[in-house]
Amino acid sequence: MSKQYRCTPILGALAALAAVMILPAYAQHAGHEHGAGGKTITVTGELVDLSCYLGHGAKGAGHQKCADTCLKKGLPMGVLTKDGKLYLILEDHAKADAYASLKIKAAQTVTVTGELHEGGGIKGIGVTSAK
């Protein structure tokens, strides 16, 4: 038997093993992109840059210039509601424009709708629309 024919079963087994390992990860990510079926919520509040808000309580119109700079750098942002609840803003991969539109609204009152995500004591919203 030639060397080429002895390698064929080994290559086939390696390809099958790779498929078994890769397909579940692909299916899981594909499910993530299309939503995991979480609760849709709408919140209204001040758009804050989380670095300054959590670091030293900075918010409001007096902090807008700094918050604009922080958001343009890509630092995380959140919505702070009137009752003091803070939601991390997350990009919904299918609706990235809604997330991007918030980056120029630091210190302004915004209304955000999206899928609620919770983990490790943090609440976040995968934004599907923003005003």
Image (tube, rainbow, N blue to C red):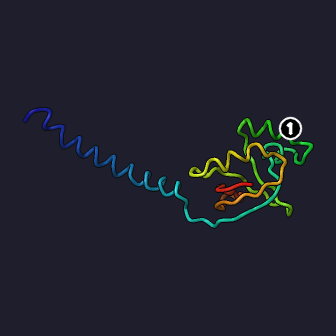
Q: Residue furthest left?
A: 1
Q: Residue drawn at (82%, 60%), measured in percent from left and top?
A: 81
Q: Residue furthest front?
A: 131
**Left or right of 62, for residue 11:** left
Q: Quadrant of the C terminus?
A: bottom right
- The answer to which image quadrant residue 73 occupies is top right
Residue 100: x and y, percent? 68, 45
Q: Amino acid at mark 1?
A: Lys
- The answer to which image quadrant residue 113 occupies is bottom right
Element carrying mark 1: helix
Q: Quadrant of the N terminus?
A: top left
Q: Give above or below for 116 relative to 77.
A: below
Q: Residue drawn at (75%, 47%), measured in percent from left and top?
A: 77
Residue 51: x and y, percent? 79, 43
Q: Residue drawn at (71%, 54%), measured in percent from left and top?
A: 130
**Left or right of 129, for residue 47:** right
Q: Give above or below for 103 relative to 111.
A: above
Residue 41: x and y, percent? 69, 65
- Which residue corresponds to mark 1? 65
User: Which of 113 and 73 lies nearest the eye of the viewer?
Assistant: 113
Q: How many marks?
A: 1
